[in-house]
Image: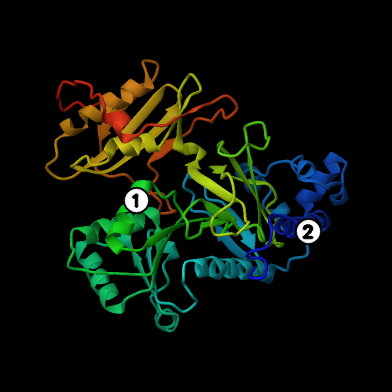
Amino acid sequence: MRRQEFASFEEIKETQWDRLKILLQHAVRTVPYYRQQFTNLGITPDDIRTPEHFAQLPVLSKAILRKHRESLVSEAAHKKTLIPNATGGSTGQPLQLYQDQQYWDWAYASQVFVESWWGIRPGDRTASVWGVDRDLPPSGWKQKLESVICQTRVCNAFALDANGMHRFALMLQDWCPRYITGYASALEVFAKFLSDRPQIVIRPHAIKSTAEVLSDRQRSLIQNVFSCHVYDFYGSREVNNVAAECNPHSGLHVNSLARYVELVDQGGKPVSESIPGRVLLTDLTNYAMPLIRYENEDIAAWCQGPCACRRSFPRLSALLGRKSDFIVLPSGKLIHGEFFTHLFYGLSGVSQFQVVQTTPNMLRVDVVLETGTSGNVLCPVAASIREVLGDKVACEVRVVNEIVRPISGKHRFTVSKVDVPWGAATIEKHSRAAIFGSPTQVQETEDVG
C-alpha cells in the first residue's frame, strides 16, 4: 500500500482490476453460489474484461446473502479458519457472515496506512469512545494487560452516567491520548459532556469518526471541544476500511487496493460525479466468503477533480447515509434526514428524536424531552415538517420516554421503510435559514401531534 500511495490513477486501477480478476476466478472455482450465477449467465471469469462486463453480474443484496449464506462460503476454506462476524441489525435483521485471516490482515494494514495520513502510528495512545457493548473488550486480566501494552482505553458513552463520564474524562486528561476514535454519535455525546466542563482539557492529535454519517454540526462540535482535526472514516461489518478522509478534508479516498466500489442508480447504471447513487462493494481480500457487488444499502456520491494531497485513489464526496435515511414523498421527491436534524438544532429541552416513515403517506416523529420541558416547544417543528411534507402526508409528532437503540448501538435519526425511487427522484436540501426563515404561526398546545 505504501508503494502505491502516490501511484497514478491508471496504475491503481490496473492493480485493482488484477485483484478483481483473481477473486472472480476463485469465486467461480470454489463458491457454489457464484458458480451457479456464472453458469446461469453462460459466461466465465475470462469474459469479464471491462468494468461494463463486470457490471452485468447480479447485485448481492442483504436478502440474498441471508438466504444463500452457506452457499457463499468457499469450499476451499477450512472451517477452523473461518472467522464469524455479524452486522448489528440496525434494520432489525442482523446479518451473519464469515471472513478469513487475509481479510483481517488487509484490514489492519489499511487502518495503519490511513492513520499515517493523520500523523498516527501503531502504539500511539488511543482512546475509543464507543457506543455498543459487544465492541467493548472483556474486563478480564488478560484484556486489561493487553490494553496496557497496546496503550488503549475504551469507554461506552451510551452506558455511562455523568459520574462515569467524568471519571473517564479525568483519566484521559491525565493519560493524554494522542488519538481518539468512535461512533459519530458517541463522540458527540462525549464532546457535549466536555463542552459543559471547560476545566477538563483533552488535546489529542487526531480524532476518527466512524460507523455513522458525520454531520457538519457534529464535526464542528467535536473539533471545537478537542481542538484537533476530525477525520471521517467509512466502513461496515461486512466490508470494513472502505474509504477515509485525508488532511485536506475534500472527500473520502476509496481503499482501491482492497475494495472495488461502484455507485449506481436504481436501474444499476453508474452515476455521474456528484450524483447520489447506491453503494455496491466488492471485497478483494476475503476469499472465505467473497462479497461481489454487495449492496450495503448506503447512498453516496463521487468527488470531482483531483485531491490536493496528490493521492490518486478516487474519492467519495458525500456519504448521505442509508437509503432508509431518506423520506419519500408520494410525488417521488426525497427529503434527506438532515432536514429533520436541522429542525432540532439549538432547540432547548429536546434530548433525542427519531423520524419513522412506514408508508409514503404516514410519518411519525418521536421526541424525548428533558425533564420539565413542555411539549409546546415542538409546535414550530411540527408546523415546519407539515409545511414541507404537504397535505398528502399525515404527520404525528409525539413525546416518548425513550428511543431504543438497535443492537448496533447507532442512533438512527431517520428510519424509512419506503423504497427510494432513485431513477426520477430529486433530493430536497434545506438549510437552517430556509427552515427558520419564515416561521409558521402555530397555536401553542400540549397536543403537538
Residue 206, percent from left and from top:
40, 66
Q: Which mark is residue 142?
A: none
Residue for point 37% across, 49% down? 405
Q: Name the residue: 52% across, 46% down.
A: 317
Using the rendered view, name the quadrant where residue 203 is placed. Answer: bottom left
How packed is label 2: few (under 14 Cα within 10 Å), some, or many (20 or more)?
few
- What amino acid is at disc 2? Asp
Horizontal and vertical percent position of residue 51: 76, 45
Q: Residue at x 35, y 70 (%)?
A: 204
Residue holding disc 2: 18
Quarter of the image where the N terminus is located? bottom right
Residue 302 percent coordinates (x, y): 58, 44
Q: Name the residue nearer the viewer: 256 or 291.
A: 256
Q: Secondary structure at mark 1?
A: helix
Residue, disc 1: 218
For the rendered model, the colour scheme is: rainbow
* Residue in the image at 79% along x and 56% along y: 21
Q: Nearer the viewer, residue 390 or 397?
A: 390
| Mark 1 vs mark 2, CA separation in Å | 39 Å
- Can you name the residue that lies furthest to the top here? 391
The one nearer the camera, 49 or 167, is: 49
On the rendered image, what quadrant is the C terminus found in? top left
Q: Earlier in the sequence, mark 1 or mark 2?
A: 2
Left or right of residue 158, residue 255 in this image: right
Asked whether 229 or 74 is in front, the reply is: 229
Q: Secondary structure at mark 2?
A: helix
Does residue 427 lie above or below 60 as drawn? above
Determine whether 244 is above or below 420 in the image. Answer: below
Name the amino acid type tagged 1: Gln
Q: Using the rendered image of the protein, determine whether residue 158 is visible from the camera's viewpoint.
A: no
